[in-house]
Amino acid sequence: MKKAFFNWSGGKDSALALYKLLNDSEYKVEALLTNVSDQFDRISMHGVRKELLIKQTESLDIPLHTLKLTENISMNDYDEIMKHQLSEFTSKGFTHSIFGDIFLEDLKKYREEKLSEVGLKGVFPLWKMDTLTTVKEFIDLGFKAIVVCANAKLLDESFVGREINHSFLADLPAEVDPCGENGEFHSFVYDGPIFSTSIPITIGDKVIRHYQEETEWDSSFWYCDLVLSSLK
């Protein structure tokens, strides 16, 4: 079996891609890698607390590696930090890196180029799958996920904190990809067939955050805080 690590975001696409890999005898997933904000101690972009990430990975029973990143890190610095981490994986015998990407060609090309620099190969279990079919498969398999972040340009406050189910899909505006593949929304998976136990969560505060970017596409996001029920 090929020794692989999974680029884990904690969201639905990661969960479905991991589900497929765990049922594929060609690969053995021996590690998860997640980017975490050094300032906020939360999953980068998703805004999910690190303690929830840890609960997820404990339920998956796969070792977690976190990559701490500063806010507004440059791409050059990010590439150097990631290259160091990837080199550590190769030194431990890892040969493949797994992603939940579906159709973003430029992103896939970037990932494969960076992996090739250290002798790794990329694996994309969901690549070119129809996104509506993909999210419906995720739901029908029994996965449970909450929307934790949404692009405020496309989705209002009512969408964060919602369960991803068939009703949610029916309410999405036509211009929003059903999987949020263009960054329209992100999620946190708290239950499903790959988990040994459900992660008990409570819906917390909802806030909107504004960022200074070159374009207006991703300048404002709604976030919904999730809290471990035992901590509230």
Image (cartoon, rainbow, N blue to C red):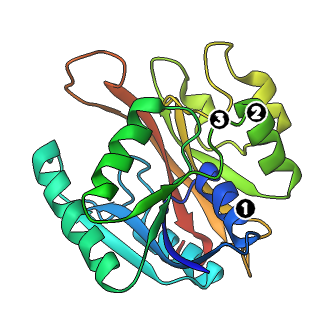
Q: Nearer the viewer, mark 2 or mark 3?
A: 3
Identify the residue under disc 2.
168
- Badge 1 element: helix
Q: CA distance from mark 2 to mark 3?
A: 23 Å
Identify the residue under disc 1.
20
Q: Which mark is residue 128?
A: 3
- Looking at the image, which residue is at 44% across and 49% down? 46
Q: Quadrant of residue 118?
A: bottom left
* Quarter the N terminus occupies: bottom right
Viewer-proximal residue among 87 and 227: 87
- Looking at the image, which residue is at 54% across and 44% down? 101
Q: CA distance from mark 1 to mark 2?
A: 24 Å
Viewer-proximal residue among 200 and 129: 129
Amino acid type, mark 2:
Phe
Q: CA distance from mark 1 to mark 3?
A: 15 Å
- Badge 2 element: helix
- In the picture, measured across the screen, residue 70 lies left or right of residue 139, that is left
State yes or no: discs 1 and 2 in contact (Cβ < 8 Å). Answer: no
Q: Earlier in the sequence, mark 1 or mark 2?
A: 1
State yes or no: discs 2 and 3 in contact (Cβ < 8 Å). Answer: no
Amino acid type, mark 3:
Lys
* Quarter the C terminus occupies: bottom right
